[in-house]
Amino acid sequence: MTVAAGRRDLTIGPIQLRSPVVLAPMAGVTNVAFRTLCRELELTRAGTVSGLYVCEMVTARALVERHPNTMHMVTFAPDESPRSLQLYSVDPANTYAAAKMIVDENLADHIDMNFGCPVPKVTRRGGGAALPYKRRLFGQIVAAAVRATEGTDIPVTVKFRVGIDDEHLTFLDAGRIAEQEGAAAVALHARTAAQRYSGAADWERIAELKQHVTDIPVLGNGDIFEAADALAMMAQTGCDGVVIGRGCLGRPWLFAELSAAFTGAPMPTPPTLGEVAQIMLRHGQLLAAHFGEDKGMRDMRKHIAWYLHGFPAGADLRRALALVKTLSELEDLVGQLDPTVPFPEAATGPRGRQGSAASVTLPEGWLDDPDDCTVPAGAEVMHSGG
């Protein structure tokens, strides 16, 4: 990372970003439609596209087997650069094959590896946030991706959590191993798998990792809902960049605000309800182009509550929007929103899934030997990221 007066840049391998901001992969959210919308809003509201926008996570095995849904998920916009793809894998062989496929077929410019998923159906099979506990296997998977991209301009980065729970912390080992195996950067979601998305992220863990991993950038993730949160995280932890997840749900213009904060540009004015209505319509149009109108509108429904969070919209109109079926219906319904309503203070802060902490389900005997490098059986399933 290089720092200059009024701005911060981030370098990940050969990729140079004008701001140290990364969109976290989120299943069912960060498809090409959402990424395009975020990039458009950053360009129009901040005058630049400066960060890294990562596509939905895909499973290495499904990519290698060319599962139709997976191949559709790795769609990028024609002008999207750099193209960033996140892989989930528990198997070094599948990891190598998937990364080599990405290289040989020019599918992406950056590969991120996900070891942060806390979903029970994944951890009970040894995947996601459970896997870094198996230090040797974790290292073999990272090394396989790096080996497949040798001699190219495609960097490999790694995202993980603090650990399985407070008694089984893995983040320092994971950071050290990823660095040793050739990762170009690491990102820490500052929660354990047991926390899932509940409680507060422990930013002190990010500071610890930054002190422990010194040769590659360390990115922080967790509880960034405003541009001020990103600045505070970097000031408090010394991390080199920030990863934005739930904070941008229903607020795709957040990246314009982050860009302004890091590049020294004027801070954009928060959108009125009328402007949000137009953003919602544009999102629906992009989803319809990607999925087709029927599936695009079904996908759009989950975004409605996020967009209208804190705004006065009326119960009947909210219900109608939650059942929207066509683009023309979406256009008609958002046209009924009062365009003069300013962005409400209540619309800031936490959003998206939070849930509650719970014990982590693991395979029998998983904690017995952290150096066991046996590939867990049946763990390469689709899941919701971490």
Image: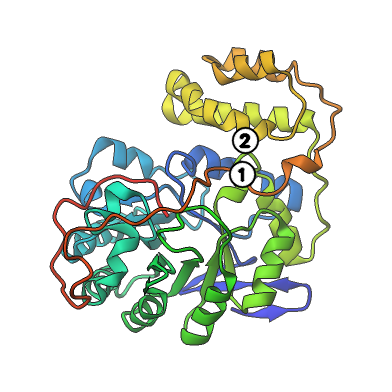
Q: Amino acid at mark 1?
A: Arg
Is 43 placed left or right of 291 in the picture?
A: right
Looking at the image, tell me whether mark 2 or mark 1 is earlier in sequence order.
2
According to the picture, the residue beneath numbered tag 2 turns out to be 306
**Would residue 130 be seen by someone viewing this image from the given angle?**
yes
Q: Which mark is residue 351?
A: 1
Task: Please state the horizontal and vertical placement of residue 359, each as a whole percent of the image.
Answer: 36, 56
Residue plotted at (56% across, 42% down): 352
Q: Amino acid at mark 2?
A: Trp
Q: Residues within 10 Å of mark 1 (few under 14, many from 20)?
A: some
Is 129 above or below relative to 331? below
Q: Nearer the viewer, mark 2 or mark 1?
A: 1
**Would residue 214 be seen by someone viewing this image from the given angle?**
no
Instruction: Out of 287 and 343, give the one closest to the viewer.
Output: 343
Q: Residues within 10 Å of mark 2 (few under 14, many from 20)?
A: some
Q: Which mark is residue 23?
A: none
In the structure shown, which secondary structural element does the residue marked by tag 2 occupy? helix
Residue plotted at (57% across, 27% down): 284
